[in-house]
Amino acid sequence: MHAQALTGEQHAATIGAAKTERPTPRIERLRIRSLTKRFGELAALRDFDLDVLGGEFISLLGPSGCGKTTALNCLAGLLEPDGGEIELDGTSVMRTPPERRRFGMVFQNYALFPHLTVGRNVAFGLEMQSLPKARIRDRVDQVLGLVRLRDQRDKYPAQLSGGQQQRIAIARAIVTEPRLMLMDEPLSNLDAKLRLEMRTEIRRIHQALGLTTIYVTHDQEEALSLSDRIVLMRHGLIQQVGTPREVYMEPASAYAANFLGSRNLLSVRVTKAADDLHVETRSGIALSGTPRGPLAPGDEAIASIRPEDVTLLALGEDGANTLPGVVETVEFLGRGTELSVRSGLDEGIIARTDDVWSQGDAVALQLPPERLLVFPAEDPGEIV
């Protein structure tokens, strides 16, 4: 499945409005066409098409091995693509060596020099450009202020926390005023609390400097919170491109729905696809739903619903897609409770609610038809 390339034109008005409140981006447009990379028989990246507007924050999202880091390394010039084109403001950079592309890169492991102080780590790229010492000092001071670590200038990386080290890695990348910022899973080595704090910091710095950022992550929450647009990938192919709200609320496939948090997947067969969509589970239960893709009577399909869209009512309540069930497990999450409910369906249904239920409670399980999304069938083994 190859998703149609999106140019980003529909986002120009929104991003253009945001530009009035932040510095002018250093580029106008990044254009990627048919980017392909193979490793032997493995096609790690296939026909990757994307347009990025200056000032956008784009996340490449997907599981390990989906091609997102390969795409980032091709952009950086660290890998040579087997085909395709990369243009920055109308000029190809395919034959431009990495050091001349003027891209900033932040790695998963920080890649700081342990024998250099924080100040020297940040200054390294400027020293390689042989800039005057006074200008280097002023620029480093400015950037350390931006990442709120000016008072750590004379310390060494080992004396800093993981979050501080990641801020230094970001400072080193932005001090050279890159045309494009590339980030490869920069928060994966941090604990949960630091990840939340650094997400805020990354977005703040991105906006403060008018950066254009391509960000690689396997964490859907990270992508949803940071991005202007998300590029969802699988097996080297783009599956869907859209705003966080679009890819979350209107997934293009069962894979997209599942990867972005829809944990309830049911194998069904379409029984009616004319006016209202009707399906039947393997256990013979009839349900109505909302189609997502071409479906015809007799087709095998996958029905999906998010836990927060499942409704639990007192037993005896009636309505569309309402089944009797029993609460099997209860997990308190702080901001609500997650339940597993056994009913006549083939699989247990996960529901998220603010109401109080206990293990063993009899309930009426309701799957609202407008939120029960039905997709053309995919190999369940391929959905991760």
Image: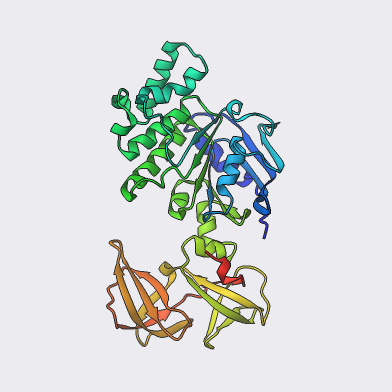
Q: Name the residue rendered at 50%, 59% in the picture.
A: 248
Q: Name the residue rendered at 50%, 55% in the picture.
A: 245
Question: Which x, y percent locates residue 202?
Answer: 42, 39
Position of residue 152 relative to residue 42, above or below, is: above
Question: Which x, y percent locates residue 228?
Answer: 52, 45
Write down the quadrant of residue 72 in the picture: top right
Check the picture and name the quadrant holding the N terminus: bottom right
Q: Name the residue rendered at 43%, 54% in the picture.
A: 221
Nearest the camera: 271 or 125? 125
Q: Name the residue rendered at 29%, 83% in the picture.
A: 360
- Which residue is most to the front? 40
195 left or right of 181 in image: left
- State how the image is colored: rainbow
Position of residue 234 relative to residue 295, above or below, is: above
Q: Is residue 101 visible?
A: yes
Q: Is residue 278 visible?
A: no
148 left or right of 254 in image: left
Q: How many marks?
A: 0
